[in-house]
Image (cartoon, rainbow, N blue to C red):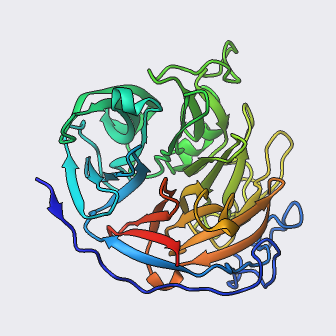
Amino acid sequence: MKKSLLILSSAVSILFSCQSHTPNGAPVETQQANTTYSAAFEGQTRIQSVKTSTSYKSEVITENLGRPWGLINLPDGSFLITEKSGFMYLLSADGKQIQKITGFPTVDDRGQGGMLDLAADPDFNQNRMIYWTFSEPFEKGNLTALAKGKLSENSHTIENPTVIFRATPAYDGRLHYGSRLVFDKNGYLFMSTGERSDKMTRAMAQKTDNDLGKILRLTRDGNPAPGNPFIGKTGHLSEIYSYGHRNPQGLALDSEGQLWETEFGPRGGDELNLIQPGKNYGWGDVTYGIEYSGEKIGAGITQKQGTEQPVYYWDPVISPSGISFYTGNIKEWNGNLFVGCLSGQHIDRLVIKDRKVIGEERLLEKENQRFRDVLSGIDGNLYAITDSGRLYRISAE
């Protein structure tokens, strides 16, 4: 049964400053870095700050979402939101009505696992198909699985849920599932996977005979997408699009159709990457971070021939999760990348020009929330979910 949700008020954030496209202040990061590593090029980290000149407000439109992980709009403006314990919520566009959707396969929601990201089929209006990732109990461990199913006409259940892809090998762990989803302009599905955290699996991110620490590109049936870079190459899995990733929880396409990714570093070294087919993004040979113990990772290098440099990195970490390019009502934000930050407890705004970061701003810092995912909504507003179960709407005043 649907139930009404109390619309909660929150602190209104109003910022005034100079125009946003010209960096105009000291870097937003003031804490000491974990390493003494030097950036590979100017502007790769700690870029100058910008401030939004448009007046805007933030509102909590519900705080009853349990443990949300992924957030999308359906074509009618309503929201689909995953909940880690193994189901989804359907939330009306105005935030007043919520419904629980059940019927999903069992998840392993220990640690960082559970029901993770989701995506609506490009033809959802015709077929009502939904895709989602989850940590699936498998063999003697678990893995990141991709499934699809049809949302019932009454939106109460998922019909014929079917696992269409499993990121192998399985591993008995509770960390680093990765797991964002985004459809490209051709209707193929990008899927990120983590390298499962432990040192024994870390090395697999550098190998192309497995699915750990990768960006994959799949058909709607879970098969390797045509045009993938390793199709037909011996010793390479055909579903792999890029490799050398740690724990990528952010995927988004810009206005040109280019794929961008954020991933968690260890102690320092969170990354923003521009993803190119067939490229190696370095983990666990190259990083701007160190082990949590303080020791160097591998040879302690930040550059290596044959690996790609991040467009931008953070040290200390902000723990970048979901990302979204803004296409809404605040004109100075258009084309900016918004990043939900967990340990950073803010939404990071990155101004990008010619595929380089030229300005950074932190939003909603005073809310003290772990922002898990962000969405440039089809109504022109920015939305964000938090680990505490809140859904925020950020809109022009």
Vertical position of residue 179 compared to residue 163: above or below = below
Residue 289 lies in quadrant = bottom right
Judge whether residue 164 can be spotted in this image. yes
At horizontal 44% and vertical 29% (from top left) the residue drawn is 123
24 or 83: nearer the viewer: 24
184 or 41: nearer the viewer: 184
Q: Residue furthest left?
A: 1
Vertical position of residue 236 compared to residue 2: above or below = above
Judge whether residue 268 can be spotted in this image. no
Residue 47: give x, y in percent of width and height: 79, 73
At horizontal 61% and vertical 86% (from top left) the residue drawn is 15
At horizontal 36% and vertical 42% (from top left) the residue drawn is 135
Q: How many marks?
A: 0
Residue 74: give x, y in percent of width and height: 39, 45
Q: With 275 as the anchor, is 302 left or right in this view? A: right
Q: Residue furthest right?
A: 41
Residue 200: give x, y in percent of width and height: 54, 44
Residue 322: give x, y in percent of width and height: 52, 56
Q: With 86 as the anchor, is 327 left or right in this view? A: right
239 or 218: nearer the viewer: 218
Q: With 47 as the anchor, is 268 left or right in this view? A: left
At horizontal 58% and vertical 41% (from top left) the residue drawn is 213
